[in-house]
Amino acid sequence: MALTPLTQRRLAQFKKNRRGFYSLIIFAFIFLVTTCAEFIANDKPLLVYFDGHLYSPVLKNYPETHWGGVFETETNYRDPVVKDLISAKGWYLFPLIPYSFDTVNYDLTVPAPAPPSSDNWLGTDDQGRDLLARLIYGTRISIWFGLILTFFAMVIGITVGGLQGYFGGKIDLYVQRFIEIWSGLPILYLLMILSSMVQPNFWWLLGIMLLFGWMNLVAVVRAEFFRTRSLDYVRAAEALGVSNISIMHRHILPNAMVATITYLPFIINASITTLTSLDFLGFGLPPGSPSLGELITQGKNNVNATWLVMAGFTSLALILSLLVFIGEAIRDAFDARKVVAS
């Protein structure tokens, strides 16, 4: 499918912003690496060649008896006995980081949290778990949380803002008053109260934050629909009998999406920050879950373990900075004045 000249100019303008363009490349790399976390950081082998057959424990669980052991429970591949059983009839290939986010290193020579070493590249946390593995898994949760929340918030925000801007009148009045009341609630405190009443998880937190996150786009979409509905081509479509839904979807929404897209990286940024804040305060994901907020909490509780402080702060600062730079580049790409000037 060929790109329109306007889209080509916008892409060219985006690439001209070197900081935003390279930030997108780095963010995409982090996204791909963390999405494939199980194949990069895991305490299960990627491949096992045993007795003439290939197995992939990272994809399927096998009992220890499958390798000639005595226990019928899931295999602990870090056990030296299991390694000897497999090596006797084949070989095994571990991921680059042979630890999962919840794997405890019982072979530490110093008390946890242990400093960086050849075994644990970024050190361990205060429970002896590999810091790099938890950082990879925690970053994946944060990024996916922000992306999913932003997607659903965008759908709801565009729908509500479009209805307000297109129909106006009582619909606009009532919805606007509701948004003013709803947005005036102390969101973080409500999230903390609700999180203390039930055991939160990924989807529960996503649903609660979605109750408030959709309002960020309403004002932008409402103003764009309100401006566009009075243009001649919209009036002509109404005179020809085109349905309201078709007019909103085909004639007005594409214009509203220009302003909406520029806001998306900043909404993702806010979503990640809110999740990190809840995890830091202890009202986020269940205990033991890998999260950037939990890493920052461990850094606060172990100020002498500088590797904990630096890992949590650096990872969060990097992700948020990349998203801000990407958002600035997208804003410049959709700026009509800069696109026309180029």
Image (cartoon, grey):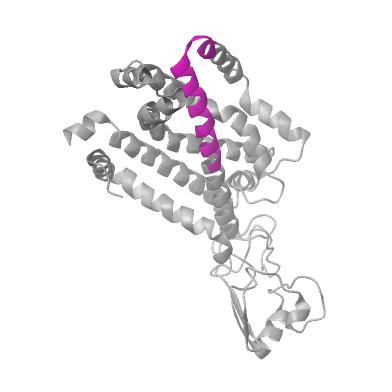
Q: Nearer the viewer, residue 139 or 268?
A: 268
Q: Nearer the viewer, residue 303 or 180?
A: 180
- Asked if residue 72 shows in the view, the reply is yes
Report the residue at 53% width, 14% height from top. 171
Q: Is residue 108 above or below residue 257?
A: below
Give the farthest residue toward the left: 341
In the displayed structure image, the side of residue 62 where residue 245 appears, left or right:
left
Residues drawn in magenta: 148-173
Residue 288 image position (x, y, % from top left): 70, 51
Q: Quadrant of residue 242?
A: top left
Report the residue at 40% width, 38% height from top. 324
In the displayed structure image, the side of residue 102 where residue 166 appears, left or right:
left
Answer whether residue 155 is magenta in the image.
yes
Answer whether residue 237 is magenta in the image.
no
Report the residue at 72% width, 31% height from top. 194
Residue 332 image position (x, y, % from top left): 29, 35
Report the residue at 60% width, 56% height from top. 134
Secondary structure mostly seen in the magenta stretch: helix
Q: Nearer the viewer, residue 281 or 163?
A: 163
Q: Nearer the viewer, residue 242 or 290?
A: 242
Give the farthest residue toward the front: 240
- Asked if residue 306 shows in the view, the reply is no
Q: Quadrant of residue 118?
A: bottom right
Residue 142 image position (x, y, % from top left): 56, 46
